[in-house]
Image: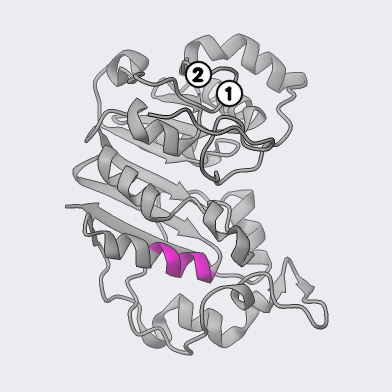
Amino acid sequence: MDSPAETPDQPFRSHPVSFVRRGSRLQGRRREAWDDLAEQFLVAVPRVADADTSVAPGFVLDVDAAFGRSAPLVIEVGSGLGEAVTHAAELEPDRNHLALEVYRPGLAQTMLRISQRGLTNVRVAQVDAAAAFAGMIPASSVAELRTFFPDPWHKVRHHKRRLVKEDYVELAARVLAPGGIFRLATDWSSYAVQMRTVIGASGYFENLHDGERTGADSPLTQVWESGVESVVGGAPVREGKDPVSTGNTGVNEGVDTLGGWAPRFEGRPLTSFENKALTAGRMVFDLGYRRR
């Protein structure tokens, strides 16, 4: 395989990625957490040169060795500060939980949470999920895959950077075991529609809530009717400008006749991020699928 092309903002990559490189400097308790806890909780991933979210070709994670036991594996992609994954690990002590995140301070905070709660069934990895799913995570090894609130990349020219596209769905199908569960959530309607469309078209998954929450009961219908997405973070759209969300995405069809939306996943805590979305008046779209 040819070596990936290097670009200034995406070194060693031949395709757009779904994340933006942010500061990786660690300070205070996060610095201490990284120094003290990484050996115990951080998966050591071999890299391509100095690309700190890459995976060296040929590396396959020995999941049982990483956790020190054999148990069903749950992966959360984009674990942020670790609120959801540590909550899940407490609720599900009989399952192994792996958090994938590119943001180093977030991983440090997650390890601090793991330690403070005395959890033994969580590991973290600083890695691009797409790179991990392409080879690092063994095929058909995952019992449940969770992708909550990925970056929506509102502008049309940036849609190619959204995580949940056809290629990601293919990779999700690769790592999920038959019967495995794929859970997603977003607070932006256009991304929710994209998720529903690409996963439904893949043929790999069956919607656990096919045909549910249609018409007036659909959160999509409710968002279209309310016009809430013409307001971003509580700030009105500037005169002459399109809304950041639906104005740049799909067509407002008035009524969602397809549905398929899941009820809110009870295993996901109300994080500060989700609470901000709800405070701004936006709605959260949950989706749930089973690997065929």
The kind of secondary structure element at disc 2 is loop
Crowding at label 2, few (<14), some or many (≥20) Cα neighbours within 10 Å?
some
Looking at the picture, which amino acid does disc 1 mark? Asp
Looking at the picture, which amino acid does disc 2 mark? Arg
Residue 27 placed where, x, y %?
77, 21
Residue 190 placed where, x, y %?
52, 70
- Find out whether residue 283 is within the magenta segment: no
Which residues fall within the magenta stretch? Answer: 189-195
Residue 32 is labelled as none
Residue farthest to the bottom, as pictured: 254
Q: Is residue 90 visible?
A: no
Q: Is residue 202 above or below residue 280?
A: above
Q: Residue at x 63, y 27 (%)?
A: 104
> Which residue in the protein does label 2 denote?
47
**Is residue 278 or residue 8 the one in the foreground?**
8
Q: Is residue 31 left or right of residue 183?
A: right
Comes first in the chain, label 1 or label 2: 2
> Which residue in the protein does label 1 denote?
52
- Find out whether residue 190 is within the magenta segment: yes
Mark 1 to mark 2 CA distance (whole Å): 7 Å
What secondary structure prevails in the magenta region?
A: helix
On the rendered image, what quadrant is the N terminus found in? top left
Whether tag 1 and tag 2 are in contact, CB under 8 A, the answer is: yes
